[in-house]
Amino acid sequence: MRRSFSVPLAGLLLALAAGPALAQPPTTPVPGPRDPNQPPASSPNGPQPLAHAVGDAGTGLAVVRLGPQGVPTSTILPGFGEQLPKQSVTELGLGLSSAQVNTEAFLATERVVTQANPFGFAVAGRAPQTPGTLVQTAIPDNPQPTKGGLPIPETPLAKLSVLNGSVQARWDEEVGPCISPLATATTSLAGLQVLSALPAEVPLAPKTGLVSIPDTFEASSAVRLVDLPGSKNKAVASTSTMRAVSIELAGGLKIDVVTPPTLTATATGDEKTSTISYTAPVLKVSQNGKDLGTLDAAHPVLDVPLLLDLVVVKLQIAGLTEKKAAFSGNGFTGYQLGATARMLDVQLLPTDKLKLPNLPTALAQISLGEQIVRAAAPQGGVVCGTSQPPQTNAPQEPGGAAAPPKKAPPLAYTNAAYQSVPLFWTGAGLLLVGVVVVAALPVRRRPRRVPN
């Protein structure tokens, strides 16, 4: 099991409210020569895959936000921070999975990256690195996924029982990303309690927490190449899926997941055929056996009073956010698109009815099932093939038959000469001859000096 201490997509999952960023996934920059007159970095030898594809998908089982939208976003650009959504005072993400494909990455190990992260956190929008990530990268290819248990974080905001992860990153030496499965990552937990450390004065059953998930809760992220109708080329599809049975809230509230959400971004390279597909969740809400209503695309919000209308829990299916744009640079030109969604938002003490400025949207917000997908494909789709080395026309013999190919001269083993190995043996032979000649010469003894 290979683990890493870097969490490159945890920050994305903790800031999904800002919308999907459509820039290319971050990769190692291409190094340039110190001297501008020097040649660039050497290109790989032999045939190379023709496919160009960029896509990533991220899913978080649960994200806890204290003081959501309560801190202004800081930026080095003057005045630009006011245009960005505000950050939460504190954020904690649990069960994060991400799958990333980037054929234009400079490092071979960054072309396909899959991660299953136990947790990540941020304070005022700043997210430090956290250990314990399950990672698989390609190149080289990984025919089998890596599976294992993830370390469970100890925090007063959430308690977990069992957390498992599975990651797989594939790459074919000839056709590159044209392989199935390509990039998949999954995190699953059994037993979750969120905000179990609330004060006893708050009538929310602190022993069980504000939100409890007794059954299996699974998040999956995947990037794959799919068939492009009417063409032999492929499209890039990034998919985020959730699987849950039921969710229990304090005060006897229970939410049954009738239809889990699925979010997919499919990039074909053309704006007209690139699509975002979203299956909105259908959730049935009850309290102590009494039916309170259904949360779906037509009824996305439900307020449930817990104490004389003073303590309110707001249940909301987060709306779908989409972004689309033309794509150009890093090797190809095409079209890209992205989307974000959340299965369920649970807000404790929402402040929208107070109508006071500069207040967070709620005392605390728990988001279950955060999803983000992005995909980019070149015009005409992804070409699955292998480039061939340039062919030269062989000279013809007078009779019409092609002349046999001439043997290419051997390349230099070193910068000194083209035949360094024969030079080595020649030098060794001359050294041996010199030793024999010196040994065969008579030894001349120096006369002794007689003292006066």
Image (tube, helix red, strand yellow):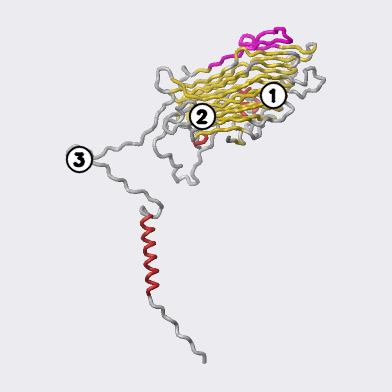
Q: Residues within 10 Å of mark 1 (few under 14, many from 20)?
A: many
- The single residue placed furthest to the left in the displayed view is 399
* Labels 2 and 3: the sequence-earlier one: 2
Q: Amino acid at mark 1?
A: Val
Q: Nearer the viewer, residue 272 or 293?
A: 293
Residue on which disc 2 sits: 101
Residue drawn 41% across the image and 53% down it = 415
Q: Amino acid at mark 3?
A: Glu
Describe the element under mark 3 as helix, strand or loop. Answer: loop
Q: CA distance from mark 1 to mark 2?
A: 28 Å
Q: Is residue 35 left or right of residue 253?
A: left
Residue 213: within the magenta? Answer: no
Residue drawn 66% across the image and 21% down it = 367
* Labels 1 and 3: the sequence-earlier one: 1
Describe the element under mark 2 as helix, strand or loop. Answer: strand
Q: Would residue 326 be visible to someone looking at this image?
A: no
Residue on which disc 1 sits: 64
- Residue 48 quadrant: top left
Residue drawn 71% across the image and 28% down it = 90
Q: Residue 208's spot in the image, x, y percent?
A: 75, 20
- Residue 368 quadrant: top right
Disc number for residue 397: 3
- The single residue placed furthest to the bottom in the displayed view is 452
